[in-house]
């Protein structure tokens, strides 16, 4: 049963969950399966009709590769670099680190020349 009034915190949390769910390419059905809740419950959460437990918050953060502050605070304007790497297969991490290091060296050299 839905609450008569949406709580402001539930609306914010729901918006953030939806934002990161979509950014990670999950459907509502996929995410609900991964965090072990019903699709209807996840719909109510995303719309601000229902709140979530700490256990559910933890599952959401683990699946979406984000920290809980991304869900609890109004900050959905961008995704951190760390969040992009979270879902990348660990076998590629070393290669990515080398690429990033090389890019940083190029930026450093370019800055020195200016």
Image (cartoon, rainbow, N blue to C red):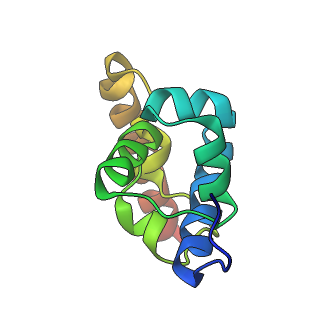
Instruction: Give the residue drawn at x 62%, y 57%.
Output: 1
Q: Nearer the viewer, residue 81 or 12?
A: 12
Q: In the figure, 31 relative to 110: above or below?
A: above
Give percent across and percent down for residue 3: 62, 70
Instruction: Give the residue drawn at x 47%, y 28%.
Output: 34
Q: In the figure, 85 relative to 81: above or below?
A: above
Q: Nearer the viewer, residue 11 or 62?
A: 11
Q: In the figure, 5 relative to 86: above or below?
A: below
Q: Nearer the viewer, residue 53 or 108?
A: 53
Q: Quadrant of residue 29?
A: top right
Give percent across and percent down for residue 56: 37, 48
Q: Is residue 26 left or right of residue 58?
A: right
Give percent across and percent down for residue 71: 47, 64
Count of numbered marks: 0
- For the view shown, which residue lies furthest in the top direction? 91
The reply to whether residue 26 is visible in this rendering is no
* Quadrant in the picture for the C terminus: bottom right
Instruction: Give the residue drawn at x 68%, y 49%.
Output: 43
Instruction: Give the residue drawn at x 44%, y 27%.
Output: 88
Give percent across and percent down for residue 89: 40, 21
The reply to whether residue 82 is visible in this rendering is yes
Q: Nearer the viewer, residue 53 or 34?
A: 53
């Amino acid at each position: 049963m839905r609450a008569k009034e949406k709580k402001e915190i539930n609306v914010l949390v729901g918006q953030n969950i939806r934002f990161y769910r979509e950014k990670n390419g999950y459907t509502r059905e996929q995410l609900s399966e991964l965090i072990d809740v019903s699709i209807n419950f996840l719909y109510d959460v995303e719309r601000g009709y229902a709140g979530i437990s700490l256990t559910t918050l933890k599952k959401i953060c683990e699946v979406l590769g984000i920290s809980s502050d991304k869900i609890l605070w109004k900050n959905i304007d961008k995704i951190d670099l760390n969040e992009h790497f979270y879902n990348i297969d660990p076998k590629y991490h070393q290669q990515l680190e080398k690429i990033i290091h090389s890019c940083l060296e190029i930026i450093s050299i370019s800055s020195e020349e200016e």
